[in-house]
Image: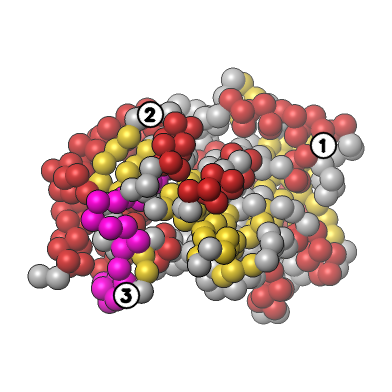
């Protein structure tokens, strides 16, 4: 049996282990991450589908070599806003032949220990789990000669501070960061489909995903009708205890995000925007909030919100919408709803299909663009066979090749970026 087939058999064992322990993983994720029972069940089932999807990548992976020597490993620092899906990132790096050193966010330490209990009997020392704080983990990985590559999911402000260390130690640094995703409703759009998609993708995980829509641009001819329907759908969201099966949206986990949401709402109101729904915050529970009359220079339109708050702005023509959608330092994903010409609008927002060298940070393009397509559909196979990631400060790769420091941007696969051609 070839090495890739042996590793894939281990992944099949992991799929079985997760399936057999599904309820316990969901229970721990609800308690540890604070997401709802419904959300955690969806995440586990989606993750199992993604892990099965690696079967289709055997030919691709068999033609590549790991970035690591046998005594080396890739360092992977994961975010707090997830539980089961994090397996996809770990396994994508392992399947191309690397040993992996994994650090879950401190907030997810119980998820980490449970995940480790499933991994150890299957993968042994090939995948190990660390429990130091994130800063120590990263600094140790930077200086460790047996870690040639580091993958970080996190804040761009945090990641940017490591550029000198990456250069000094000659690391390959793969960063997956925030989004401030635009949601654009053009003339001819199916308002019902658009409003339902915005409500689903905005409120799942209480807006705590990098690809949650945060800047909503609606053509002036559709604005009032769209807002009315979106507000109606937002009112229907059931808020409450994450462990209650009927709850559709739970609390926002981060105290920093709560502070940002409050500051953004105050700034919006101070500048003349209107809160037409919500605005209520009880501790970490942020009720669905809809703000109209948003302007480009408001904090809520420029800084990541990471919560269930939507800022809506009307536009007069497509050129104006295109300009506003591009006007942000993040370029992860964009959603476009419109008639059969909407695909042309989407093409103007999309970057290249796969990450590529750039002279400097590229702004105004997006790694993924969904046209009349839901977020869940466009994210199928992410990190497995579908490359994801973005432009601007939403993600990048730093590496030194032939003594030249290189910046790459655009969607990527962690498996491909932690492996190489023979």
Left or right of 236 in this view: 20 = left
Of the numbered discs 1 and 2, the one sitting upstream in the chain is 2
Q: Distance between the residues labelled 3 and 2?
A: 35 Å
Per the rendered image, the range of residues in magenta is: 57-78
Q: Which of marks 1 and 2 is in front?
A: 2
Q: 356 or 111: which is nearer to us?
A: 356
Left or right of 6 in this view: 376 = right
Residue 422: image tag: 3
Q: Which residue is drawn at 61% across and 53% down?
A: 394
Q: Split into 4 quadrants, where in the image is the N terminus?
A: bottom left
Q: Is label 1 in a helix, a strand or a loop?
A: helix
**Residue contact between numbered discs 1 and 3, judged by CB atoms under 8 Å:** no
Residue labelled with disc 2: 132
**Residue farthest to the left?**
1
Q: Residue at x 59, y 20 (%)?
A: 283
Q: Residue 280 at what x, y percent from top left? A: 68, 26
**Residue farthest to the front?**
403
Q: Assess whether residue 39 is covered by the magenta stretch.
A: no
Q: Residue 386 at what x, y percent from top left? A: 44, 67
Q: Residue 161 at what x, y percent from top left? A: 61, 41
Image height of 48 relative to 108, above or below: below
Residue labelled with disc 1: 268
């Amino acid at each position: 049996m070839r090495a890739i087939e042996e590793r894939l058999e281990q992944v099949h064992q992991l799929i079985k282990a997760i399936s057999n322990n599904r309820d316990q993983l969901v229970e721990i994720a609800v308690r540890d991450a604070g997401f709802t029972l419904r959300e955690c069940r969806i995440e586990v089932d989606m993750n199992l589908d993604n892990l099965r999807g690696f079967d289709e990548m055997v030919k691709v992976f068999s033609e590549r070599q790991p970035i690591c020597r046998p005594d080396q490993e890739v360092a992977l620092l994961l975010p707090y806003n997830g539980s089961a899906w994090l397996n996809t990132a770990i396994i994508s790096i392992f399947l191309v032949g690397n040993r992996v050193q994994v650090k879950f966010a401190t907030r997810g330490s119980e998820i980490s220990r449970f995940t480790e209990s499933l991994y150890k009997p299957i993968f042994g020392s090939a995948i190990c789990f660390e429990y130091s704080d994130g800063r120590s983990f990263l600094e140790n990985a930077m200086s460790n000669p047996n870690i040639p590559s580091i993958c970080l999911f996190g804040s761009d402000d945090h990641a940017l501070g490591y550029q000198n260390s990456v250069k000094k130690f000659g690391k390959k640094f793969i960063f997956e960061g925030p989004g401030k995703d635009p949601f654009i409703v053009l003339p001819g759009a199916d308002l019902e489909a658009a409003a339902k998609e915005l409500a689903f993708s905005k409120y799942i995980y209480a807006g705590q995903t990098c690809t949650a829509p945060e800047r909503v641009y609606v053509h002036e001819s559709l604005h009032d009708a769209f807002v009315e329907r979106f507000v109606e759908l937002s009112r229907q969201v059931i808020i409450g205890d994450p462990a209650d099966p009927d709850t559709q949206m739970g609390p926002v986990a981060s105290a920093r995000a709560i502070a940002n949401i409050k500051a953004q709402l105050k700034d919006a109101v101070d500048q003349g925007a209107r809160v037409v729904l919500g605005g209520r915050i009880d501790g970490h529970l942020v009720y669905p909030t809809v703000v109209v009359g948003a302007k480009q220079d408001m904090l809520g339109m420029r800084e990541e919100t990471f919560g269930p708050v939507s800022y809506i702005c009307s536009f007069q023509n497509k050129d104006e919408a295109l300009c506003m959608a591009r006007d942000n330092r993040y370029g992860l994903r964009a959603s476009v709803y419109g008639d059969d010409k909407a695909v042309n609008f989407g093409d103007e927002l999309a970057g290249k299909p796969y990450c590529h060298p750039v002279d400097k940070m590229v702004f105004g393009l997006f790694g993924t663009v969904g046209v009349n397509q839901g977020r869940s559909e466009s994210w199928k196979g992410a990190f497995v066979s579908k490359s994801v990631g973005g432009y601007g400060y939403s993600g990048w790769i730093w590496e030194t090749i032939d003594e030249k420091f290189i910046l790459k941007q655009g969607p990527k696969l962690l498996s491909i970026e932690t492996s190489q051609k023979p």
